[in-house]
Amino acid sequence: MPDPQPTHAGPFALGTFAAGAAVFPGLVTGSRVRDLSDLVPSVRALVEDWDDWLPRLADLAGSSDGTWHDLAALRVLTPLEPGQILQSGANYRKHVVDLVAAEKESVHGATPEEARADAELMMDERARNGVPYVFLGSPRAISGPYDDIVLPALGEQHDWELELALVIGKSGKNIPAEEAMDHVAGYTISNDLTTRDRLYRPDLKAIGTDWFTAKNADTFLPTGPFLVPAAFVGDPEDLRITLRHNGVVRQDESTKDMIFDIPRLIAYVSTTTTLRPGDLLLTGSPAGNGAHWGVFLKPGDVVESEITGLGHQRNTVRSGQ
């Protein structure tokens, strides 16, 4: 495992760590971690009482009391055990325009200029009057930010999709968009991997996509390294998302390119499900996935991911066969 780097925004962040067999919630300040297990059993429990804990965490970050570790000596696990995992699809304008334009060229015979112009008009209309596309993921797919990605035996087109993920810190149902940000505790990084050639069921074409099979293999959601409180992140609509595959930059985009911003995503999902502290909402992935490049993950590959102020991930790919 590479040494974790203290690259998060703000004076402190949160995470879950292992020192040998002991697993504990921790407060990260610079290159040091304060073991919080004497105060709270998990980061999830802390988030469930977020408004009370946030000022206490600020005090703890400035104190020498308690047990402190060197960050580099710890194994960094996924920051918290989530409740629901809500995943937004087709939410970056350039990415979706590329997909729609390619279909218009290949299926409908449009010129590249016509296809792109039509696709951009479609996205403008979708942003004005459409709704997000959201589906559920399995918590069992989550892995740590430096863990190996283990490819399943079935399928060959294993793809990356780096995403800004937010952690809910306040319960709500039918949340108005103008109140949505009050429900966000903080942010982390998730790489929402997909096995493309298992996404569509040839035996059930009328049903459409098989998200369970394509997206929920073990280790297919590297998440972390930290939960960074929202107050330290700045404008979440102006963060840089960057992914490197074997050292080559494949995704490099601003969250400004989101079609539906975070308040609209929260408002939309809360019309169906009650959001609760600890729920994880992934906000979509920008252009540059493996399908775009015609390159997919193979054993031995290395995926390096970062989002402004949230730290970085580094995952080595191996075969599960």
Image (cartoon, rainbow, N blue to C red):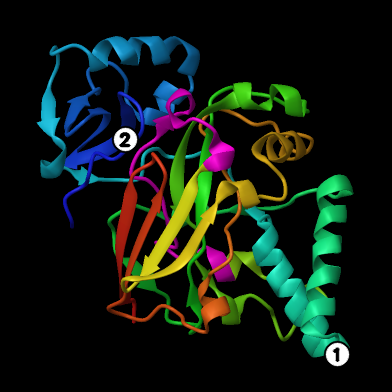
Say which residue label 1 marks: 109
Where residue 279 sits: x, y (%)?
55, 36
Q: Amino acid at mark 1?
A: Gly
Q: Secondary structure at mark 2?
A: strand
> What's the residue at 55%, 41% (across, down)?
238
For discs 1 and 2, the disc positioned in front in the rendered view: 1
| Label 2: how many Cα within 10 Å (few below 14, some 14–19, many 20+) | many
| Quarter of the image where one finds residue 69 | top left
The stretch drawn in magenta includes residue 61: no
Q: Which mark is residue 15?
A: 2
Q: Secondary structure at mark 1?
A: loop
On the picture, is 257 further left or further right than 295?
Answer: right
Q: The N terminus is located in which quarter?
A: bottom left
Name which residue type carries label 2: Gly
Quarter of the C terminus within the rendering: bottom left
- Magenta range is 214-238
